[in-house]
Amino acid sequence: MIEFRGVNKWFGALHVLKDITLSIEPREVVVICGPSGSGKSTLIRCVNGLETTKDGDLIVDGQRVGDPATNMTDLRAEIGFVFQSFNLYPHKTALENVTLAPIHVRKIARSTAEAAGRELLARVGLADKFNAYPSELSGGQQQRVAIARCLCMRPKIMLFDEPTSALDPEMISEVLDVMVSVAEEGMTMMVVTHEMGFARKVAQRVVFMDAGGIVESGTPEDFFSHPKTDRSRAFLSKILRH
Amino acid sequence: MIWQQFQGLIGSYPLALRGLGMTVALSLISLVLGTLIGFALGIVRTGSNQLISRVIGAWVDLIRGTPFLVQIFLIFFILPELGIELDAFTAGIIALSNLAACFICEIVAAGIRAVPNGQVEAALASGLSRRQRIQQVVLPQAMRMSLPPLVGQYVLLIKDSSVVSAIGLTDLTRVGWLVVQRVPNGLLVFAIVGVGYFIVCYPLILLARKLERRMGTAHGEVQL
């Protein structure tokens, strides 16, 4: 579903992605972790073309990202992206946030889109917030609207870029619960997160990155219990100590 | 003598109304045209084409950096040399619309640049086309920020319209000059002219203030 073959990327002189080779199967949930600045956000942002790659191949849903022959707008419609800072549209209500792309990109009738949007907002526990503006919602509620906004497009792939990092601790679980339910429905997911409980629960694979490269990858059980490299051991000791 | 002057002034009221009508017509047409062109320029200015953006930037700087009186003379006296016949009213409309477009372009561009990048990324990631991203996500937020300075700019432009009297248009200011020849009391006449402009501008000043206040309580605050 997502395939990186020898992908490199530079920010000026900084080599931020080093020879990335990674293949993600349909319905697979992969957690990407690593210290800050390791390139994990950049990696996930390449998948829907928010960042461009320098060389190597990146094939998503059978289409080559960055190829002039690939219609990136069409490809992006198939990929949900959840941001660390939510990025809800502040001038639109929760329901309008969720239905904007289905109405304008998928050309679904407004009434149909609104019915689907209400159903999804109810599913993420926001049945009483259809007409609330983002500024009236808590961070956890905003992030759940953002997830519903992606789901309403019926995407084939969902990408999460540190979805709980900007949240107060008591709001993290309400967002993770929604993500778990999405994973359990068989969505193909790439999740940048340090939430190891989430990784253990639903991820088939954990990929550990450091300094722009993939250092190690394995099942959550293997990775957490028997990290193979010094760098992953050092990283795990830091995040698991708390 | 004051009494005679008042009678002279009262006798001039049809002329004053004509002047007021000219000022309002000139301002209204120019502001509508200037707003439309200014928005288009502002959108293109913040677009991806560097060359077009630079050309617009240079034009805006040129217009903002030269006196309006000079611009009006250039348009009124040079265009006919190039074989383009135009009357004073058309020349006034062109000059004032151009000035308005340049200022409004910068206001709109500043509003667009102030929309957080994450908003564009969210719209991009959901598969919205460029036109849809601008229409649905960027412009509504940019508008919220641009509206108070935009209305404030309208007030300045209406006052700038007084410069068109220099090419012979009978606007409010020129009526002042005409009346003063009949009623030799400059202070009184131009005080009344000032009141005329104030009557046109004050509602806009109030509107700008109201918009600014409403912005503070709107749902437009950026969430981070």
Image: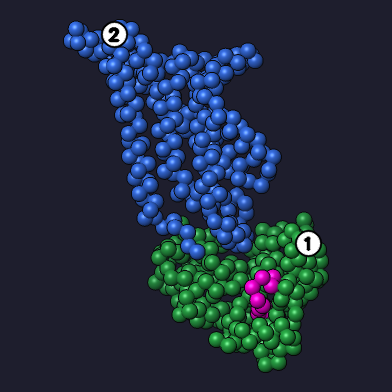
Chain colours: A green, B blue
The residue singled out by tag 2 in the image is B184
Determine whether label 1 and label 2 are within 8 Å by CB: no
Tell me which chain the residue with mark 2 is part of. B
Question: Is A31 contained in the magenta span?
Answer: yes
Count neighbours of disc 2 (C-alpha within 10 A) and say few if under 14, some if 14 to 19, many if 20 or more. Answer: few
The residue singled out by tag 1 in the image is A54
Judging depth in this view, the residue of B85 and B65 nearest the camera is: B65
The Cα atoms of the two marked residues, 1 and 2, are separated by 78 Å
Judging depth in this view, the residue of B83 and B145 nearest the camera is: B145
Q: Is residue A123 above or below residue B135?
A: below
Q: What amino acid is labelled 1 in the image?
A: Lys
Q: Residue at x 48, y 62 (%)?
A: B223
Q: Position of residue B8 (x, y in %)?
A: 25, 9
Judging depth in this view, the residue of A6 and A122 nearest the camera is: A6
Camera-nearest label, 1 or 2: 2
- Which quarter of the image is occupied by the C terminus of chain A? bottom right
Specify whether residue A223 is in view. Answer: yes
Magenta part of the protein: which range?
A: A28-39
Q: Which structural element holds mark 2?
A: loop
Q: Position of residue A75 (x, y in %)?
A: 69, 63
Q: Residue at x 50, y 81 (%)?
A: A173
Question: Is B139 contained in the magenta span?
Answer: no
Please indicate whether residue B114 sits to the left or right of residue B57 in the image: left
Quadrant hosting residue A227: bottom right
Q: Residue at x 32, y 10 (%)?
A: B180
Count neighbours of disc 1 (C-alpha within 10 A) and say few if under 14, some if 14 to 19, many if 20 or more. Answer: few
Q: Is residue A28 above or below residue A43?
A: below
Q: Residue at x 60, y 17 (%)?
A: B79
Quadrant hosting residue A165: bottom right
Q: What amino acid is labelled 2 in the image?
A: Pro
Specify whether residue A204 is in view. Answer: no
Judging depth in this view, the residue of B132 and B70 nearest the camera is: B70
